[in-house]
Image: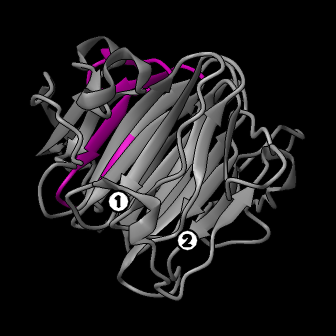
């Protein structure tokens, strides 16, 4: 059955971005920001009441056709009955430890920063070892939960990647990150590709790991940018002034036009970044 979530409260801001030619003034585009404190949580499965996880929309609407992204909160010790979904979804652990696998599989408790893919039609369970939060993203909707008797094989296979098994790339390995111009050795930003074709113009999902004290800009010509703070506290600059907005873990910001977003991380940050086509991270 579908998730029932009322439209979330959110902030629409006019966000400045730099034009390519140096010395020109800031142009304007609209950036949507959603903070965890603004999310309206609803039970994932109203029929189960508070025995079900809670869901809160970040972007899109998972109860309708189309793409969307939302947070899911799990209570300590939660374990779902075997079930399937009508669509494939991708998930990233934000807090706690989650397990998502076949009903007979031994638990693989994935900590924050881990990610997984659950194919449509495949029977599975989801469990939480501690109070946990995950980010879930779908490419089409609505997001439905169905009985295991309706299982089918869509040709996809599940993926479970523990945070310790992720391969990270730096500026020497990818053109998506520009090398910092510094004579002193410093911790560098790193990137990992999660899904999609990085050489195409279709949607691609990545994660960025930014060191403490990182200050830079995320530049893209993409008509769709989605960013979720997986770990840390991101300070997002709102305009050419020194004003910035604090985005804690679980926050989202996005835009629907080419843009350059300026931000700072006091401590290490982990960001999920979804674009259509390439972006460039510049220190």
- What residue appears at the point 55 percent right and 17 percent down from the top-left corner? 75
Q: Secondary structure at mark 1?
A: strand
**Rendering coords of residue 38 (x, y %):** 23, 15
**Rendering coords of residue 12 (x, y %):** 11, 30
User: In the picture shown, does residue 112 fall above or below 180?
Assistant: above
**Is 134 displayed left or right of 161 in the figure?**
left
Q: Residues within 10 Å of mark 1 (few under 14, many from 20)?
A: many
Q: Quadrant of the C terminus?
A: top right
Residue 146 lies in the magenta stretch: no
In the image, 159 versus 248, the foreground residue is 159
Q: Residue 192: in sight, yes or no?
A: yes
In the image, 97 versus 172, the foreground residue is 97
Query: Which circle's residue, 2 or 1, is located before the other in the chain?
Result: 1
Residue 246 lies in the magenta stretch: yes
**Rendering coords of residue 80 (x, y %):** 54, 37
Stretch of the chain drawn in magenta? 232-261
Q: Residue furthest top?
A: 37
- What residue appears at the point 81 percent right and 61 percent down from the top-left corner? 167
User: In the picture shown, does residue 60 fall above or below 148?
Assistant: above
Q: Which residue is mark 2?
A: 195
In the image, 98 versus 59, the foreground residue is 98
Q: Residue furthest front?
A: 149
Q: Secondary structure at mark 2?
A: strand
**Rendering coords of residue 178 (x, y %):** 63, 60
Nearest to viewer (mark 2 / mark 1): 1
- What residue appears at the point 34 percent right and 50 percent down from the top-left corner? 226
**Measured Cα–Cα span from mark 2 to mark 1:** 13 Å
**Which numbered tag is attached to residue 62?**
none
Q: Which residue is mark 1?
A: 138
Q: Residues within 10 Å of mark 2 (few under 14, many from 20)?
A: few
Quarter of image, res 244: top left
């Amino acid at each position: 059955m579908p998730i029932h979530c009322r439209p979330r409260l959110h902030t629409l801001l006019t966000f400045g971005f730099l034009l390519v030619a140096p010395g020109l003034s800031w142009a304007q585009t609209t950036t949507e920001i959603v903070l965890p404190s603004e999310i309206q949580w609803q039970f994932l499965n109203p029929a189960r009441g508070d025995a079900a996880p809670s869901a809160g929309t970040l972007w899109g609407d998972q109860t309708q056709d189309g793409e969307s992204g939302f947070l899911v909160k799990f209570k300590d010790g939660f374990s779902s009955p075997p079930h399937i979904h009508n669509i494939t979804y991708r998930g990233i652990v934000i807090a706690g430890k989650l397990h998502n696998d076949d009903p007979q599989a031994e638990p693989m408790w994935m900590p924050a920063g881990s990610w997984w893919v659950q194919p449509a039609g495949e029977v599975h369970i989801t469990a939480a070892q501690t109070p946990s939060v995950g980010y879930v993203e779908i490419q089409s909707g609505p997001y439905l939960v169905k009985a295991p008797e309706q299982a089918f094989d869509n040709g996809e296979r599940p993926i479970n990647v523990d945070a310790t098994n992720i391969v990270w790339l730096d500026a020497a390995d990818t053109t998506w990150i520009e090398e910092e111009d510094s004579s002193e050795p410093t911790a560098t930003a790193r990137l990992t590709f999660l899904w999609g074709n990085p050489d195409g113009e279709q949607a691609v999902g990545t994660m960025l790991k930014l060191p403490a004290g990182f200050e830079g800009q995320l530049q893209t010509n993409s008509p769709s940018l989605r960013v979720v703070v997986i770990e840390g506290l991101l300070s997002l600059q709102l305009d050419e002034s020194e004003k910035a907005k604090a985005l804690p873990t679980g926050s989202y910001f996005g835009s629907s036009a080419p843009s350059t977003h300026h931000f700072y991380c006091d401590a290490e940050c982990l960001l999920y970044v979804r674009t259509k086509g390439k972006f460039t991270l510049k220190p």
